[in-house]
Image (tube, helix red, strand yellow):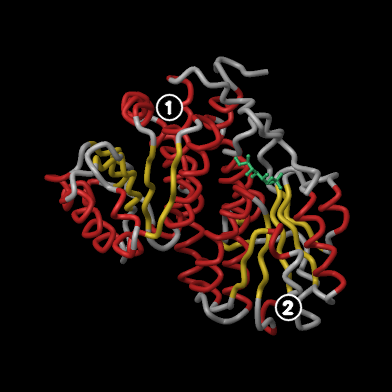
Amino acid sequence: DKGNHRHFMAKEIHEQPEVVGRTIAHYVDMAALRVAFADPFPFDFKSLSRLTICACGTAYLAGYVARYWFEKLARLPVDIDVASEFRYREVPMTPGGLALFISQSGETADTLASLRYAKREGQHVLSVVNVATSTIARESDTTAATLAGPEIGVASTKAFTCQLAVLLALAVAAGRARGVLSADEERRIVEAMIGVPSLMTEALKREVDIEHLSRELAKASDVLYLGRGTSFPLALEGALKLKETSYIHAEGYAAGELKHGPIALVDEHMPVVVLAPPGELMEKTVSNIQEVAARGGRIILVGDARAAHEAALDTFATIEMPDVDPIVAPLVYALPVQLLAYHAAVFMGKDVDQPRNLAKSVTVE
Ligand code: M6R
């Protein structure tokens, strides 16, 4: 049932304040402002020397965002790869390590094969899944569910942000266990997490502007997405979302990598979507976009009033975002990214819920 929406993708984008709120409420103690998992972990974050993350597509990109969190909040080294590579890399793993698999469907063939490999290598297997009865959930030692509800649209939206919510809670739990995060820092992050649903609702209010802007994307044959830090994997996700729904060629790049090649592509026909949430890297991202502007690129800036102010003169358009705590920015900034892809595809008359050549669940390698 699509409710009042034209497509499942639209419905699922708009459900995010609710389902992400529900997922966060499940993993935090609202009164104590602490992360709280119902059962104690059957492994010890404190003694881990490495975390291995493995998934496909959008789930992989959620893991890629989480890598920054585990490294920063828990000082835990992270190895991450797409499952189709991981499963054949013959990765040597130290027994007793932790391997984390992320999957909406819980049935993705490559992710499942990677999980089985990790088990054979003596890893403890933790999975973040949306379908609690799935094969990946069943074969894991521990699961942390995303409470996104059924996701019908082939392009993953609400599963992604719910994955981010669970992964952030896990990173905080790891940070506490490893003695990296103080109780005060944990409280600040948990407060920020609790604030996410209302910030998402705020971000969804930009939809009319985003719809308008998406027509600009629809005219393009190539689009670049740029970001730094956790906005880098989000840039990759933006490009993936646009490719799969609208069939427009798009690439995500780390903003600082631009001058090492891709800037050669930039001309006045090239929209460049720049994700510049607040944080220590915002100014660096903004300075990278000045280089794009100097070459005539049409910059669509996704940022708050400060970023807009810093970049004001040179942008083609700004999607002005509410003020967010940098740590939760990927959850909130995911929404304009999804809406851009959705509206570009709808404007172009594409079948957003069932893009050509794609299946919701990829059960063959
Ligand atoms: O069910 P999974 O989360 O394991 O699926 C992984 C990918 O196939 C999936 O995220 C795919 O990339 C989506 N079409 C992205 O929107």
Q: Amino acid at mark 1?
A: Ala
* Residue at horizontal 72 percent and vertical 44 percent from the top: 130
| Figure quadrant of residue 170 | bottom right
Q: Position of residue 115 (x, y in %)?
A: 80, 62
| Figure quadrant of residue 222 | top left
Q: Position of residue 314 (x, y in %)?
A: 15, 45
Q: Position of residue 156 (x, y in %)?
A: 61, 39
Image side of residue 148 versus residue 261, left or right: right
Image side of residue 297 versus residue 113, left or right: left
Q: Amino acid at mark 2?
A: Asp
* Labelled disc at residue 44: 2
Q: Position of residue 278 (x, y in %)?
A: 31, 56
* Labelled disc at residue 344: 1
* Residue contact between numbered discs 1 and 2, judged by CB atoms under 8 Å: no
- Count neighbours of disc 1 (C-alpha within 10 A) and say few if under 14, some if 14 to 19, many if 20 or more: many
Q: Label 1 vs label 2: CA separation?
A: 45 Å
Q: Earlier in the sequence, mark 1 or mark 2?
A: 2
